[in-house]
Image (tube, rainbow, N blue to C red):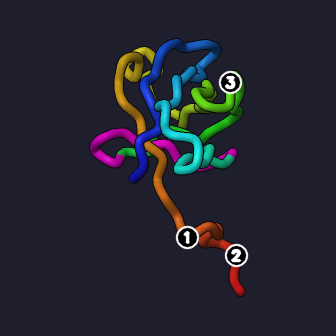
Amino acid sequence: MKRLGTALHVIQQRIIVRDEPVEEHEYQLPKINSLVIDQKRMRIGKVFDVFGPVRHPYLIVKLNKGIDAMAQVGRKLYVEETSGRDSKWKR
């Protein structure tokens, strides 16, 4: 579980998240379609887009059905770290 940032605004059932500032050589942007979870490890949605400055970007999170967008504003969100491959793909 890697900290993504704080949810700031809701626009059309999507959340704008301000990414955490981290030193340049340690940081990697989350990939598009990465799973976004809360502190209780409940799936909130997926990373839809990344924009803004490279060192401190904004992210758009597309919410899963049934998730209240306004309830997420102000909360810390996280990215679920995976092995890099989708579970549906086989070697």
Q: Who comes first in sequence, dot 3 or dot 2? A: 3
- Whether residue 66 is visible, yes or no, is no
Q: Which residue is mark 2?
A: 89
Binning the other alpha carbons within 10 Å of mark 2 as few (below 14), some (14 to 19) or many (20 upward) gives: few
Q: Which residue is mark 1?
A: 83
Task: Tell me: 67 left or right of 45.
Answer: left
Q: Which mark is residue 53?
A: 3
Binning the other alpha carbons within 10 Å of mark 1 as few (below 14), some (14 to 19) or many (20 upward) gives: few
Placement of the C terminus among the 4 image quadrants: bottom right
In the structure shown, which secondary structural element does the residue marked by tag 3 occupy?
loop
Tell me if label 3 and label 2 are in contact, CB under 8 Å: no
In the structure shown, which secondary structural element does the residue marked by tag 1 occupy?
loop
Estimate the x, y position of residue 53 in percent, counting from the top left.
68, 24
Real-space Cα separation, disc 3 to disc 2, in angstroms: 33 Å
Binning the other alpha carbons within 10 Å of mark 3 as few (below 14), some (14 to 19) or many (20 upward) gives: few
Is 43 included in the stretch rendered in magenta?
no
For residue 57, what is the image quadrant?
top right
User: Identity of the amino acid at label 3?
Assistant: Pro
Q: Main secondary structure of the magenta part?
A: loop
